[in-house]
Structures are given as C-alpha cells and as structure tokens.
Image (spheres, grey):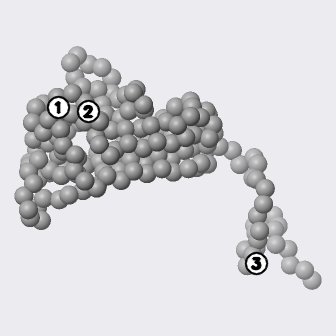
Amino acid sequence: MSKTKVDSTGIDLSDNFAFTGTVSGAGGGKVGQVIQTVKTDVFSTTSSSLVDVTGLTASITPSATSSKILVTLNLNIGASDNNTTALFRGSTQIALGDASGSKSRSFASSAYINGTVQMPSNTTFLDSPNSSSEVTYKIQGGAVGGGTTYFGRGATDGDNSQHARTINVITLTEILA
C-alpha cells in the first residue's frame, strides 16, 4: 500500500521534496530581503547640529511600492554632554518625536552620565517609503549640549577593561505586502 505524503493532518517530511512554483493565498508580511551595515570603528563629532555618522548608512531597493521597510538600529552612544541622534530616509528625518518649543526632535537622546558609559539605543521602526527605487537610510548625530558625541565608545577612553569599543548596526528588512 502506498504511503500518503500529504493529508489533512500535515506533510510527511521523511522523504525529499522538490518544490517549484509559488505559494498563493499566504497573505503579506513575508520577508523580501535583509540588508545590514555594521560599523566597528569610532565616530565622534563636536557639531551642535546633526551630521552624518560616517559608515552608518544602508540602502535597499524595495521590490514594490507597497513594501514596508523594518529599520532596526542597535547603536552605542557616548557623550561628554547631552546629544541627539536622528534617522533619515534620504534627506527626510523620520521616526521623530513631536515638536515642543526648542527641543530636539529625534528617535534617541541621552545625557552625560559617566565617562565610561555608552547608552544603548535599540530602536525598531516600520517605514513606508512608497518606492520601488533605491532607498537610503542613515544615522545623524550631534552634540547638541556641547562637548563631544561618540558612536562606538564612551566619553572617556582609557586603555583598560572599563572602556569598551562597541559596534553600531543598522538593519533593513523588506516586508512584502
């Protein structure tokens, strides 16, 4: 008697299968592609305005205008005073808080706590670029309170185990409609 490979209770995976064609009716939310940039070196700025963080840029070309891009940021920021960090899609700042007086608008901000401390900023933002052309995401940072802002190290940088060098990561995941 022949054994049924597929029935109403499941699939018998004890054999090898060759799959061809496409799956229909599964709905959206599938991952189309993943792009990741990992920055291992240190970036610093004394600018009181936002500036590009060298090496923290990633580009993705969505397969359709209906695709969404899940932007995942894992940043480690040190500062000798208050700082702010911003996410841009091209030249447009995205994922920012509401305007309030003279306050900075960004997705992350931290204050100087201790020279060895790096403030982790782990952010996930689902963006709708409405494009099937290449889209570039980048991080900008600024020492808005004065002093220096660092990505990948603390404000003090002694040569001992109390002072770490860390990575900064931007990951782009295309979510298909």
Tag shown at residue 47:
1
Q: CA distance from mark 1 to mark 2?
A: 7 Å
Outermost top residue? 101
Identity of the amino acid at label 2?
A: Val
Residue beneath disc 2: 51
Depth order, front residue of 100/60:
60
The span from disc 3 to disc 1 (Cα, nearest Å) is 62 Å
* Residue 92 rendering spot, x and y as whole percentages: 40, 26
Q: Is residue 29 visible?
A: yes
- Quadrant containing the C terminus is top right
Residue 80 percent location from the top left of the image: 10, 41
> Image quarter for residue 18?
bottom right
Residue 145 at x, y percent in the picture = 12, 30
Q: Amino acid at mark 1?
A: Ser
- Check disc 3 and report the residue beneath it: 15
Element type at marker 3?
A: loop
Q: Nearer the viewer, residue 118 or 61?
A: 61
Crowding near pointer 2: few (<14 within 10 Å), some, many (20+)? Answer: some
Residue drawn at the location 28% of the way across and 40% of the way down: 53
Tell me the mark number nearer the camera, choosing from 3 and 1.
1
